[in-house]
Image (cartoon, rainbow, N blue to C red):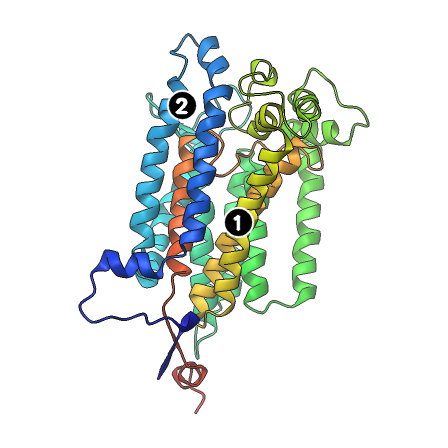
């Protein structure tokens, strides 16, 4: 016996796939993503022009590339959102294997583009950052392992996922990319928590992460420099953080006006990691609050839908992906206002970057798939299927 989620009739005889997809999709979340990307294009029209000028390129070169990346990301998102959860799981496992191998080969085949961290593969016409794809795919694999562990005679999913996490964190730290490593740990912890992890174990994980941070501080000049800059009581006005804080302060509530901002001419990463500084200076806190509201809307609606989901894998994977998206947005915004140390992390759908944008399209495609309205099995059906008779 089944009951219909949200009181809506889900299965209609002979209904077309596109019609069923549109009717079961969370349109509010989809609209919020479209708005975030539109805001990113508008900000890119201002933030990327100075970069293009410095590189001797046409004024809107990077905006045009962002539009192309956006089209690819939305294509991925829409196609994945139409898939069944089982197909997403299978493709997620295969994609994770490919992304993990790519991350492991970075020390040999990767490049740092002069930024002190080997995170990219240079393709000549573009670059790829495999860790961006690894994060959402790892969440799917983790959810699959932990869901399988809840079945009678199932594998020790939690232990296996922890072992995989340890390996992935090790290779991310080698780049070094402690920001992505921390995000991966946060997402894994969220899945583990929903799967029923004891608080004492999660506390141990947090303490272990702190210990790894201390080791990294003592052995990585790249990491130590960022932590020292964050802990310094004064901000050097000539650093990216100093420029960003001044821009946010200058913008006030209403902003200085369209194309009137100055920070985009001094911040090297104004179009990526510090795009929110451009938004705050030219459009004020109004636009910043709108961006925060859009991320909050996506997070809240996805979690509310997942609360009534009775399929263990869908609930775990969807929660992990939601936490991953929200955490990355929080970290990017937190760095800009100096409540967190610099992480080199983009603002999802808003910042410039092909790998980031397409990976976020993949993440949102999976999340839209998992949060689509679908028939929910009665709790008694789940108990019977798990051997409780």
Q: Position of residue 65 (x, y in %)?
A: 36, 25
In-image side of 304 versus 16 (left or right): right
Q: Residues within 10 Å of mark 2 (few under 14, many from 20)?
A: many
Q: Up-down: is 362 above or below 118?
A: below
Q: Position of residue 339 (x, y in %)?
A: 71, 37
In-image side of 234 versus 24 (left or right): right
Q: Quadrant of the C terminus?
A: bottom left
Rendered image quadrant of residue 90: bottom left
Residue at position x 54%, y 43% in the image: 170
Q: Count the labels in the image.
A: 2
Considering only order in the chain, which callout, 2 or 1, is on the residue closer to the N terminus? 2
Callout 2: helix, strand or loop? helix
Residue at position x 58%, y 34% in the image: 287
Q: Quadrant of the N terminus?
A: bottom left
Q: Which residue has dot 2 on it? A: 63
Q: Up-down: is 348 above or below 12?
A: above
Q: Which residue has dot 1 on it? A: 324
- Foreground residue among 146 and 268: 268
Residue at position x 47%, y 46% in the image: 135
């Amino acid at each position: 016996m089944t009951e219909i989620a949200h009181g809506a009739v889900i299965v209609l005889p002979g209904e077309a796939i596109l019609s069923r997809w549109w009717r079961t999709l969370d349109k509010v979340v989809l609209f919020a993503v479209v708005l975030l990307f539109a805001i990113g294009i508008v900000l890119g029209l201002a933030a990327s022009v100075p970069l293009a000028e410095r590189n001797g390129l046409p004024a809107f070169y990077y905006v045009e590339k962002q539009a192309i990346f956006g089209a690819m990301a939305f294509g991925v998102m829409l196609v994945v959102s139409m898939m069944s959860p089982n197909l997403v799981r299978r493709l997620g496992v295969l994609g994770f294997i490919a992304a993990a191998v790519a991350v492991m080969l970075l020390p040999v085949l990767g490049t740092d583009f002069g930024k002190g961290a080997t995170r990219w593969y240079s393709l000549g016409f573009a670059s790829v950052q495999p860790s961006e794809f690894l994060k959402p795919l790892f969440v799917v694999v983790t959810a699959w392992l932990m869901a399988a562990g809840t079945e009678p005679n199932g594998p020790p999913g939690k232990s296996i996922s922890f072992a995989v996490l340890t390996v992935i964190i090790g290779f991310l730290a080698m780049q070094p990319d402690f920001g992505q490593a921390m995000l991966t740990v946060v997402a894994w912890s969220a899945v583990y928590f929903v799967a029923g992890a004891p608080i004492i174990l999660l506390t141990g994980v947090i303490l272990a992460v702190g210990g790894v941070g201390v080791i990294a501080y003592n052995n990585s000049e790249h990491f130590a420099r960022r932590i020292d800059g964050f802990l310094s009581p004064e901000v050097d006005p000539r650093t990216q953080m100093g420029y960003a804080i001044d821009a946010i302060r200058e913008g006030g509530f209403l902003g200085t006006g369209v194309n009137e901002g100055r920070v985009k001419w001094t911040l090297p990463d104004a179009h990526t990691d510090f795009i929110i500084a451009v938004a705050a200076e030219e459009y004020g806190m109004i636009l910043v609050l709108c961006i925060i509201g859009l991320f909050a809307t996506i997070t809240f609606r996805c979690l509310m839908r997942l609360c009534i989901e009775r399929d263990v894998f869908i609930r775990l994977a969807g929660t992990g992906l939601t936490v991953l998206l929200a955490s990355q947005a929080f970290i990017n915004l937190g760095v800009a206002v100096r409540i967190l140390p610099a992480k080199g992390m983009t603002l999802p759908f808003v910042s410039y970057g092909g790998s980031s944008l397409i990976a976020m399209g993949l993440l949102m495609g999976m999340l839209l798939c998992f949060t689509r309205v679908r028939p929910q099995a009665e709790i008694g059906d789940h108990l019977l299927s798990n051997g409780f008779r």
